[in-house]
Amino acid sequence: MFHQLTLGGVQRTANNDQPTPGGIPLKIEGVSKIFPGRAGAIEALRPVDVDVAPGEFVCLLGPSGCGKSTLLGIIAGLESPGGGSILADGRIVRGPGTDRVLLFQEAALFP
């Protein structure tokens, strides 16, 4: 399972000497995903809550099978969440859009 770690005391500060970063805000609210399996339901992603500021760089870290790619697919609009919602620039993500992109680790169209 993907587990969220919150670090207390971390503050985001604006530096007026730097140009305003590009990008859009991303809000992930209670997003979860369950897949049907032969032996029963598989909880691929427990409810996740994350706020990403415009221009902020975020890494998802975790072991294989913990839900990282599932969450990225939901953010990109390639999959629908089982629960919760994703807002990109204040609009609910209902499918793929030009405001988000997902890049795969390997450049291959077919195996």
Image (cartoon, rainbow, N blue to C red):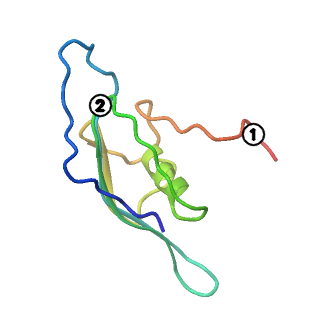
Of 45 and 34, which appears nearest the observer?
Answer: 45
Residue 74 image offset from top left, x and y in percent: 45, 52
- The residue identified by callout 2 is 54
Q: Any mark on residue 15, and which?
A: none
Vertical relation: 23 (above or below) 72: above
Mark 2, secondary structure of its residue: loop
| Residue that appears at 51% across and 50% down | 73
Residue 99 image offset from top left, x and y in percent: 40, 31
Q: Badge 1, how many Cα within 10 Å: few under 14, some, many 20+?
A: few
Residue 2 image offset from top left, x and y in percent: 46, 63
Query: Identity of the amino acid at label 2?
Result: Pro
- Distance between the alpha carbons at the discs numbered 1 and 2: 31 Å
Of 20 and 16, which appears nearest the observer?
Answer: 16
| Residue that appears at 53% across and 64% down | 66
Query: Identity of the amino acid at label 1?
Result: Leu
Please state the total of marks drawn on the protein image: 2
Vertical relation: 16 (above or below) 105: above
- Mark 1 or mark 2: whose residue is earlier in sequence: 2
Residue 49 image offset from top left, x and y in percent: 29, 57
User: Marks 2 and 1: in contact by CB < 8 Å?
Assistant: no
- The residue identified by callout 1 is 109
